[in-house]
Amino acid sequence: MNAGAGSAVVAGAGVIGTWHALELLRAGFAVDHLEAETEPTGASVRNFGLVWVSGRRSGPELDAALRSRRRWEEIGEGVPGIGFRPCGSLTVAVGEDERSVMEAFARHPDAAARAIVLLEPDEVRACNPAVRGEVSAALLCRLDATVEPRRVLPALRAHLADRYPQRYRFHDRRCVVGTERAALVDATGTRWAADLAVVAPGAAYDRLCHSSALAGALRRVRLQMLETGPLGRPALTTALADADTLRYYPAYEVAPLDRLGPQHPVAAEHHLQLLLVQRPDGGLTIGDTHAYDEPFDFAVTETPMTELLQRAERILGTPLPPVRRRWEGVYAQCIDQDVCLRAQIDERVWLVTGPGGRGMTCAPAIAADTLHAVGIEAAA
Ligand SMILES: Cc1cc2nc3c(=O)[nH]c(=O)nc-3n(C[C@H](O)[C@H](O)[C@H](O)COP(=O)(O)OP(=O)(O)OC[C@H]3O[C@@H](n4cnc5c(N)ncnc54)[C@H](O)[C@@H]3O)c2cc1C
C-alpha cells in the first residue's frame, strides 16, 4: 500500500487506537478517528502511566518496549502535555530473601539488557530520598518512565489536530457495530469507507461482528487501583515496585523466584503486587490486583487495597495521605505470549487489541508494527 495518498479509519481512541492514528498520519494518510464514548474512559486512562521496560519478556516484547520507550520520549519532547518523565523505577526488596533474588537477577545478562542494576540501601535512599522505610536493596531501572494517563489521549489528539488540520478528524459517540470490505459501520448507520480500517476496541473485542471468533485468543483481566492525596516532600524521584512484581513480570523468570517463598495470602488471593507512581500534584497512584474469572465483581474490595497501602507505607516509612479516588480497570490480554492480537477481520479491516498490562508501554511499537504488517512504510 502506498503511503501519502491513502485514507484510513481508526475505531477506538484508547492508547492503541490513538497511536495508530498518529503513525498513519505520519505516514501520509488522512485519518477519521472514531470513538464510542464522548471521551475514552477505558484502560488507557485508568492505568499507572508506566512505560515499563524493566519487566518485559526477552525477545519481541522487550524489543517493542524499547522501541516504544524511544517514541514516547520523542513525542514527549513535542507534546509536553503527555507528561513524559524518564524517572526510572526502583523494585524494592524488604528482607534478605527478596534481596537474594534481586542480587541473582542483577548478575544475569537479562538485567544488563534492561539497564537494571542492584542498589544497596544507602544508594536507594540517595536515588530516591522519599524511600525511608524498610529496604534491604532495590533494582534500579533507568529506562522505565511515566506519562500522565488522564492527559495523554487528549494531548495527543490536540497535537494531531494541530499538526494535521486537513487530514485528522476525531468523531466521538461513533460506536462501530460492523465491518464491510475496507469500511466500518457505526451505530448510526454511517459507513466509513477507507483504504485501511483499524479497530482498537480494548476489552470490548467480542462486541463487533466478525471479531467474536477471535475471542478465544483473548481474555479480560480486572484490576483495582487507588490514588491518595498529595504526599509531602521529598517528592518521589522514581516509580516504585515491590518484590511481588518479580512473580508476575516475565523478565524475572530467570531469577531464583522460589527463594521468595509463598506469597502473602491476601496477595495470592488477589494476584496482588505493589506499583506506585507519584503524579505531578503529589498524589500517589497505587495498585494493583488482578482477577481473571468473569463475571467480575462490580464492587471494589477493601482488603487487598489496605494491604497495598500498608506495603507502600512500609517502603516509604511514613503514613500516607488519605485516599481520594478508587477505581477498577479492565484490559484485554492475549492468552499466548504475543505482544498483542493483530488480525484481519474483513478485507483491509484489522482488529488490534490484547496488549494486556503492557499496552501503555508498547502502544507506539504496536501501531508501527501494524503499518508494517499491512505493507505501509512508516515515516522515518
Ligand atoms: C488499572 C490498569 C493499570 C494498567 N497499568 C499499565 C501501565 O502502567 N503501563 C502499561 O503499559 N499498561 C498498563 N495497563 C494496560 C493498558 O492500560 C492497556 O493495555 C491499554 O490501555 C489498552 O489500550 P486500548 O486502546 O487497547 O484499550 P482502551 O483504553 O480500553 O481503549 C479502547 C477504546 O475503544 C473504544 N471502543 C470500544 N469499542 C468500540 C467500538 N465498537 N467503536 C468505537 N470505539 C470503541 C472504547 O470506548 C475505548 O475508548 C493497565 C491497565 C489497567 C486496567
Image (cartoon, rainbow, N blue to C red):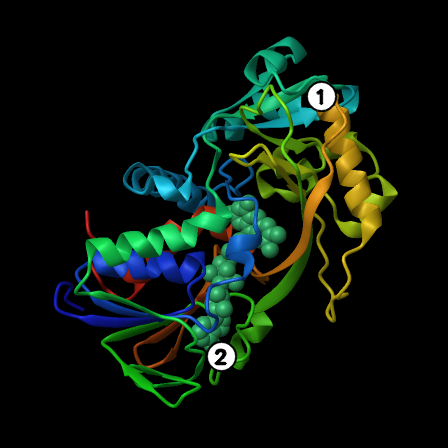
SS at mark 1 in the image? helix
Return the x and y of residue 221 as percentages of the image width and height. 65, 60
Front residue of 2/317: it is 317
For image coordinates 73% across by 31% down, the residue present is 320
SS at mark 2 in the image? loop
Return the x and y of residue 311 as percentages of the image width and height. 77, 32
Image quadrant where residue 334 sits = bottom right
Return the x and y of residue 84 as percentages of the image width and height. 41, 37
Q: Answer whether residue 169 is visible to the viewer in this image.
A: yes
Q: Is residue 89 left or right of residue 256?
A: left
For image coordinates 56% across by 49% down, the residue present is 47
The image's mark for residue 211 is 2
Badge 1 residue CB within 8 Å of ligand 1: no
The image's mark for residue 90 is none
Q: What type is the residue that disc 2 sits on? A: Ser
Front residue of 336/324: it is 324
Q: What type is the residue that disc 1 sits on? A: Arg
**Which residue occupies the extreme top position in the image?**
122
Classed neighbour count for the residue bearing mark 2: other residues with Cα under 10 Å, few (<14), some (14–19), many (≥20):
many
The image's mark for residue 99 is 1
Classed neighbour count for the residue bearing mark 1: other residues with Cα under 10 Å, few (<14), some (14–19), many (≥20):
many
For image coordinates 51% across by 65% down, the residue present is 202
Q: Earlier in the sequence, mark 2 or mark 1?
A: 1
Return the x and y of residue 342 as percentages of the image width and height. 42, 66
Give the spatial CA distance, label 2 vs label 1.
Answer: 45 Å
- In the image, residue 334 sits, relative to residue 247, either above or below, namely below
- Kindly check if marks 2 and 1 are in contact, taking CB atoms under 8 A apart as contact: no
Q: Is residue 32 left or right of residue 316?
A: left
